[in-house]
Image (cartoon, rainbow, N blue to C red):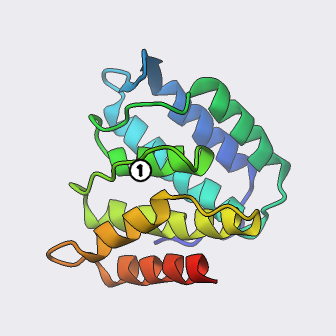
Amino acid sequence: MVELDNFYPTIVVDCFNIFVGCTRVIGDTLVITQGLEQLATTSATCFLHTFSHLLGTDPRSSIIKDIHHRYKRVFQEQLCIYNIPSSITFQTIHVAFYPYWDCLWDFGLSNHEHIISSCAQVKIVQFMYQRNVLPPWTLGFVLHSLFLDPLPPTSVIINCLSILAIALE
């Protein structure tokens, strides 16, 4: 995982704009614009990474509030995200804004994507815990990750145990 040295919070906005520009909602389904699949996946990963970094380093940032409002204007809570590439990244983003969304974790993912998602989820859970919110999806993600065969990478296991520690505080 690349650390974000000299992090500029406005990069979160740029990643979000690219992410939104590659997607649209048809009915209640998230659709990636044809020909932009790779860009959508990359921008979603970058957005998740930068947004979760901002949650962890500057939880009072006005950019968090701005992105929160913008996200909710574009994407409704009841959204089908399961039939797209990198759906776990998109699901992790969605639960950051809708913590009570009924999430069904899809674990047909790469180790890289699982690492990014679990790292982001630690920061999201810390942020929400500070606001007395513990999303119900937390335990589902952790248990599903820890019962995979073969086990996920060590960093995912450590992130899952960190999530459990926060939840049990």
Q: Nearer the viewer, residue 101 or 127?
A: 101
Q: Answer whether residue 47 is visible to the viewer in this image.
A: no
**84 is higher (above) or lower (below) than 162:** above
**28 is higher (above) or lower (below) than 83:** above
Left or right for 115, reference 56? left
**131 is higher (above) or lower (below) than 13:** below
Residue 10, percent across and down?
74, 47
Residue 61, percent across and down?
83, 55
Q: Nearer the viewer, residue 27 or 158?
A: 27
- Please count the marks in the image: 1
Residue in view at x 46 percent, y 27 percent: 22
Q: Amino acid at mark 1?
A: Thr
Residue 41, percent across and down?
38, 42
Residue found at the far left of this picture: 149
Instruction: Determine which quarter of the picture holds residue 7.
Output: bottom right
Look at the numbered disc 1 and give the secondary structure of its residue.
helix
Residue 104, percent across and down?
34, 49
Residue in view at x 39 percent, y 71 percent: 142
Residue in view at x 64 percent, y 40 percent: 14
Q: Answer whether residue 42 is visible to the viewer in this image.
A: yes
Left or right for 106, reference 93? left
Report which residue position mark 1 lands on: 89
Q: How many other residues sit within 10 Å of disc 1, few (<14), some (14-19) or many (≥20)?
A: many
Which quarter of the rendered picture does the C terminus lie within? bottom right
**72 is higher (above) or lower (below) than 88:** above
